[in-house]
Image (cartoon, rainbow, N blue to C red):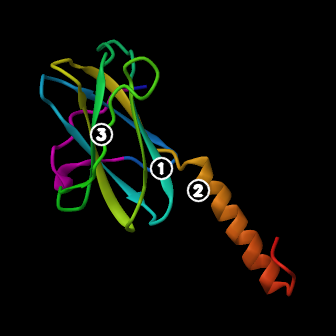
Amino acid sequence: MGINGDYGETPSIAGLVIVDSSANGAVEEPDDRDWFAVSLEAGKSYQIDLVGITPSAGALSDTFIEGVFDSSGIHIADIIGDDGGISVNSVLELTATSEGNHYTSASAFSIGTGTYLVIVPLLLISFLKDREEHAAIEAIANHEKPV
């Protein structure tokens, strides 16, 4: 897997990660922050994982997610992700309160550098909730009592 180049530190030049997919990159110097846009649906719960990966450049050894931001770059979720994953990999969970593009940033906790993978899965609880809502709508459409 090749590592993509540097991403920007603002919404206008951010990379893109799609829900239930991933993107890779590199923190190339201390204090480097790579921003990623992700389109979220209001009311759904997501997890953002930032994991150091080990190709020839060397893995980012202590990842840090600065939080979640709106389209103007304003910090909207009072959460950060640091060491919630395996070892010193970062993870945070959130339920989107609005529809559309949100942003997160990938960086090192301290002055580390290295390669990473950012992953944004839809949490199972949202999937199950959608499935229950679909079954209830289908039951009503078929003139049945919802389960």
Q: Quadrant of residue 27?
A: top left
Q: What is the crowding at mark 1: few (fewer than 14 residues within 10 Å), some, or many (at least 20)?
A: many
User: Residue at 44% across / 50% down in the picture?
Assistant: 18
- Quadrant the C terminus occupies: bottom right
In the image, residue 140 above or below residue 124: below
Dots 2, 1 in contact, CB < 8 A: yes
Q: What separation in Å lies between label 3 and label 1 (alpha carbons)?
A: 14 Å
Q: Amino acid at mark 1?
A: Tyr
Where residue 122 appears, as percent x and y from the top left, is 53, 50
Nearer the camera: disc 3 or disc 1: 3
Instruction: Tell me where the magenta segment starts and ends, as one range.
Output: 2-16
| Viewer-closest of 124 and 17 | 124
Instruction: Look at mark 1 in the image and give the residue it sits on.
Output: 46
Point out the tag, 3 or 1, that comes first from the N-terminus.
1
Residue at the image position 17 percent from the left and 61 percent from the top: 72
Q: Quadrant of residue 54?
A: top left
| Residue 45 location (% of width, % of height) | 50, 54
CA–CA distance in space, label 3 to label 2: 21 Å
* Disc 2 residue type (three-letter): Ser
**N-terminal label among 3 and 2:** 3
Q: Which mark is residue 126?
A: 2
